[in-house]
Image: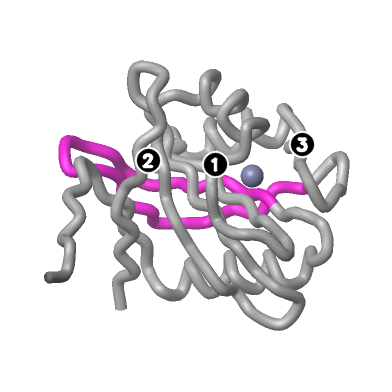
Amino acid sequence: MAEKRMYLAKLKIKSSEMRKIDAHALRAFPDECAGLLVGTSGKGGFEVKKAVEAKNTKPSPVGFEADPQFVYKVHKDAEAQGLQLVGIYHSHPDMHSFVSSRDAEFMKYWEHLAWLILGLSRSEVLERKAFTMKDKLIEQIELEILP
Ligand SMILES: [Zn+2]
């Protein structure tokens, strides 16, 4: 019998934005890429309207560092458009999509945001998963790619 997993929340994203993220991840390979997800959030989860590439200030295959000034600006721009910062995306080159211990450390400072993690090879994105942290616990959330 197939197990049906129950998720508490959902991350919805338009396929056009997902393609942008995929392209960013492949372009950055073998380094990680990172960016911000702008949209709305509510009881049912998160809805991404726009993915914004972050300049990685410390390119590396095992981490990323986004410029805080940039994060602040995206935050402000989102607010001006009646939106909010709802999540962060990053890639795991030659690895699965999972929450690394380093990611978990970061998540503590960004509770209640959605974390979209891509696992990829040099030629293709193999896996996409979304997570969030609530009361210091990491939860996987359902990723729904809208047409
Ligand atoms: Zn990671």
Question: Is the Cβ of the residue at disc 3 closer than 8 Å to that at disc 1?
Answer: no
Instruction: Tell me the quarter of the picture where residue 126 sits.
Output: bottom right
Point 21% across, 47% down: residue? 7
In percent of width and height, residue 53 lies at: 66, 54
Q: Which residue is mark 2?
A: 83
Q: Which residue is mark 1?
A: 99
Instruction: Tell me the quarter of the picture where residue 120 sits.
Output: bottom right
Point 55% across, 56% down: residue? 97
- Locate residue 112 relative to residue 64 in the image: left or right: left
Q: Nearer the viewer, residue 118 or 17?
A: 118
Chain-order first, disc 2 or disc 1: 2
Point 39% across, 56% down: residue? 49
Vertical position of residue 137 compared to residue 6: above or below = above
Q: Is residue 73 magenta?
A: no
Q: Nearer the viewer, residue 5 or 21?
A: 5
Q: Which residue is mark 3?
A: 65
Q: Amino acid at mark 1?
A: Val
- Locate residue 119 relative to residue 38 in the image: left or right: right
On-image quarter of the N terminus: bottom left
Q: CA distance from mark 2 to mark 1?
A: 26 Å
Q: Which residues are magenta?
A: 34-55
Chain-order first, disc 3 or disc 1: 3
**Tag nearer the camera, 3 or 2:** 3
Chain-order first, disc 3 or disc 2: 3
Q: Main secondary structure of the magenta part?
A: strand
Q: Amino acid at mark 2?
A: Leu
In percent of width and height, residue 63 lies at: 76, 42
SS for dot 3: loop
Would the CB of label 2 be found within 8 Å of ligand 1? no
**Tag nearer the camera, 3 or 1:** 1
Local packing at callout 3 (Cα closer than 10 Å; few below 14, some 14-19, many 20+) is some
Q: Is residue 43 magenta?
A: yes
